Image (cartoon, rainbow, N blue to C red):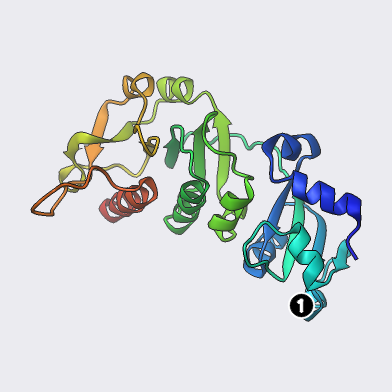
Amino acid sequence: MVSKNQIKLINSLQQKKYRNEHQLFIAEGVKVIQELLQSNIVLEHLFATSEIFSSFDVKAKTEVSTQEMKKISALTTPSSCLALFKIPSQNSIEKSGLIVALDDIRDPGNLGTIVRLCDWFGVTQIVCSKETVDLYNPKVVQATMGSIARVKVNYLDLNKFISESSLPVFGTFMDGKNIYKEALPNEGIIVFGNEANGISSEIGKNIKKRIAIPQFGEIQETESLNVATATAIVLSEFRRKN
């Protein structure tokens, strides 16, 4: 049975300030939770309904009813399990390989999908501007489908990081050079910008290599690609060339 205090705590973790205060985040769903349990991220407590309760070999767990799960879940259709994990400390950044940099990404689904894409394409590091949506937002965690356990994500002064880096810096712009015709290295920083406004002018000043995904449609009325879709195409092309 879940207590009133536990319900209050879990519901509060929908908000960033309480996640920071308690240093905890929520994960829902069997796949995401199992991936996190196999990682170095520390479990605080697991809540599961009777149908799968015994399948989790952890000490800190509570069996709950379907009705109780509805009270603690943020999903429209609650999963059969929900877990609280401790937020790990920020990782040190290895200034090598491919690094994805996110400038003011606001949509949780986009950030979660980008984390998953980096996992798929073997990019182990993401650096985010401080304005980018919180990695431990429950919707972000959900969208990563467990990849949050394998990709290091740091929040920092992005402009300072880019300006001080010795790696080549690529940025996605509408007026950039055709990515399919450019020589692409196996090391570098690739910057993706805000959903509505793209890369900020301040950060744009430090990007020497401007690339673009060309349009092939005859009418060409589409303004831009979704940032997660653009990330998939760009990372695929970087990996194909190398």
Q: Quadrant of the N terminus?
A: bottom right
The residue that appears at 33% across and 21% down in the rendered structure is 201
Mark 1 nearby-residue class (10 Å; few <14, some 14–19, many ≥20): few
Q: Nearer the viewer, residue 1 or 213?
A: 1
Mark 1 element type: helix
The residue that appears at 68% across and 37% down in the rendered structure is 16
- Determine which quarter of the picture holds residue 196: top left
Residue 237: horizontal and vertical position, in percent?
28, 52
The residue that appears at 38% across and 23% down in the rendered structure is 203
Q: Is 38 situated left or right of 22 in this image? A: left
Q: Is 177 situated left or right of 194 in this image? A: left
Count up the numbered dots.
Answer: 1
Q: Nearer the viewer, residue 71 or 225?
A: 71
Residue 111: horizontal and vertical position, in percent?
49, 46
The residue that appears at 33% across and 31% down in the rendered structure is 168
Residue 219: horizontal and vertical position, in percent?
10, 51
Q: Mark 1 highlights which residue?
A: 52
Residue 131 visible in the current orientation: yes
Residue 39 visible in the current orientation: no
